[in-house]
């Protein structure tokens, strides 16, 4: 639906509130939470040598059942500050339930 515009955000470093504002600008819809619902992605094979973890922030749109998943990486040592630091956006997906 908004794949072309989302691709421009992929690979960028943004804070989650900045990403939320960009998603609102692209979709023309307001999101419920500026940082989304954050969940850590657990790999099948842990990579202890990596200094980053992978997460998904789910941004839910007001007045719709649609949502946007943003997959991103962040330094392991900053795991407790994900809503404050710039994260590296990897993939953005629009999901619709209509």
Image (cartoon, rainbow, N blue to C red):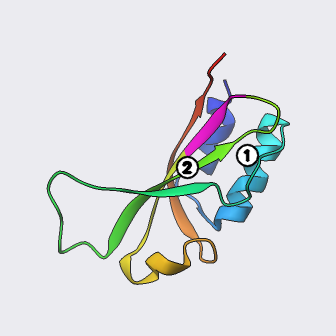
Q: CA distance from mark 2 to mark 1?
A: 12 Å
Residue at 53% in and 58% down: 38
Mark 1 crowd level (few <14, some 14–19, many ≥20, 10 Å Cα)? many
The dominant secondary structure in magenta is: strand
Residue 33 position in % (x across, y down): 73, 55
Q: Which residue is mark 2?
A: 10
Residue at 74% in and 58% down: 34
Q: Is residue 81 above or below residue 43?
A: below
Q: Secondary structure at mark 1?
A: helix
Q: Is residue 53 above or below residue 71?
A: below
Magenta part of the protein: which range? 65-69
In-front residue for pair 67/13:
67
Task: Examine the image and state in which quarter residue 45 appears.
Answer: bottom left
Q: Nearer the viewer, mark 2 or mark 1?
A: 1
Residue at 64% in and 54% down: 36
**Is-magenta flag for residue 43?**
no
Q: Which residue is mark 1?
A: 23
Residue 98 position in % (x across, y down): 67, 15
Q: Quadrant where the N terminus lies?
A: top right
Residue 68 as seen in the image, left or right of residue 88: right
Name of the residue lying farthest toward the top: 98
User: Which mark sits nearer the N-terminus, 2 or 1?
Assistant: 2
Residue 14 position in % (x across, y down): 63, 65
Q: Is residue 19 above or below residue 50?
A: above
Q: Secondary structure at mark 2?
A: loop
**Is-magenta flag for residue 67?**
yes
In-front residue for pair 11/34:
34
Mark 2 crowd level (few <14, some 14–19, many ≥20, 10 Å Cα)? some
């Amino acid at each position: 639906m908004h794949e072309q515009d989302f691709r421009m955000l992929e690979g960028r470093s943004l804070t989650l509130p900045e990403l939320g504002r960009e998603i609102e600008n692209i979709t023309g819809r307001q999101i419920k939470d500026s940082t989304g619902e954050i969940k850590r992605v657990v790999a099948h094979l842990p990579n202890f040598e990596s200094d980053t973890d992978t997460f998904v922030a789910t941004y839910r749109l007001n007045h719709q059942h649609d949502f946007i998943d943003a997959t991103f990486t962040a330094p392991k040592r900053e795991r407790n500050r994900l809503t404050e630091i710039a994260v590296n956006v990897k993939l953005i997906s629009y999901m619709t339930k209509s």
